[in-house]
Image (cartoon, rainbow, N blue to C red):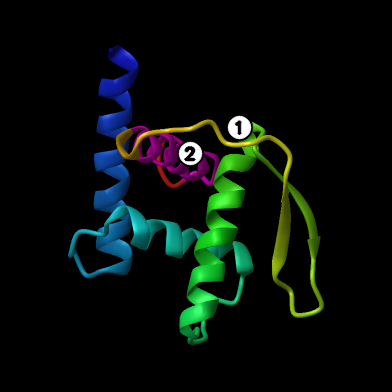
Amino acid sequence: MARDIQLKKDWETLVDVLSDRFADGDTLDLDAIIYLIGVQELGQLHRRFKKDEKLHLMHIAICRLLEPFGYYEFELFDNEGWPHYKNVEPLPPLKAGEQSVLMKEAIVLYFKDQGIIS
């Protein structure tokens, strides 16, 4: 239970920090934060992305976020600089709420590792 309370607190702190930094105070949702991580991981910060590229960015982010949990492993960068991951462990069947908790936990860990929150 204490772990859930800490995750909630860390998540709220992170959302506040990112919303202030990237959305002029509008509250970013989970998908927007995943998108930001994808852009960060690609490293092409100052360009516009097509719709299909935005989906790829979110996929990159999800792979990167779930890498520390053993579900994905970085494979290579392609000729255009896009990272590619391979699935090494099938994701367990999770309900929508459980998926959300897993992603929030992974995102908090990512930003703690980046030094954005402590």
User: Looking at the rendered structure, which numbered label has been put on residue 54?
Assistant: none
Image point (44%, 47%), residue name: 116
Image point (29%, 13%), residue name: 2
Look at the numbered disc 2 and give the secondary structure of its residue: helix
Residue 88 point in image, percent of width and height:
73, 39
Left or right placement of residue 116 versus residue 85 in this view:
left
Residue 103 point in image, percent of width and height:
43, 41
Using the numbered discs, state the Cα–Cα distance from disc 1 to disc 2 in whole angstroms.
8 Å
- Residue ranking furthest to the top: 1
- Depth order, front residue of 6/31: 31
Image point (57%, 41%), residue name: 66
Q: Amino acid at mark 1?
A: Phe
Image point (49%, 36%), residue name: 109
Quarter placement of the N terminus = top left
- Residue ranking furthest to the left: 26
Residues at marks 1 and 2 touching, judged by CB atoms closer than 8 Å: yes
Q: Which residue is mark 2?
A: 106
Query: What is the magenta range?
Result: 98-115
Vertical arrangement, residue 13 with respect to residue 77, above or below: above
For label 2, the crowd category at 10 Å Cα-Cα, with few meaning under 14, some 14 to 19 and many 20 or more, is some
Residue 42 point in image, percent of width and height:
62, 68
Question: Where, by quadrant of the figure, is residue 104 drawn?
Answer: top left
Vertical arrangement, residue 113 with respect to residue 75, above or below: above
Q: Which residue is mark 1?
A: 69
- Depth order, front residue of 74/17: 74
Q: Amino acid at mark 2?
A: Ala
Quarter placement of the C terminus = top left
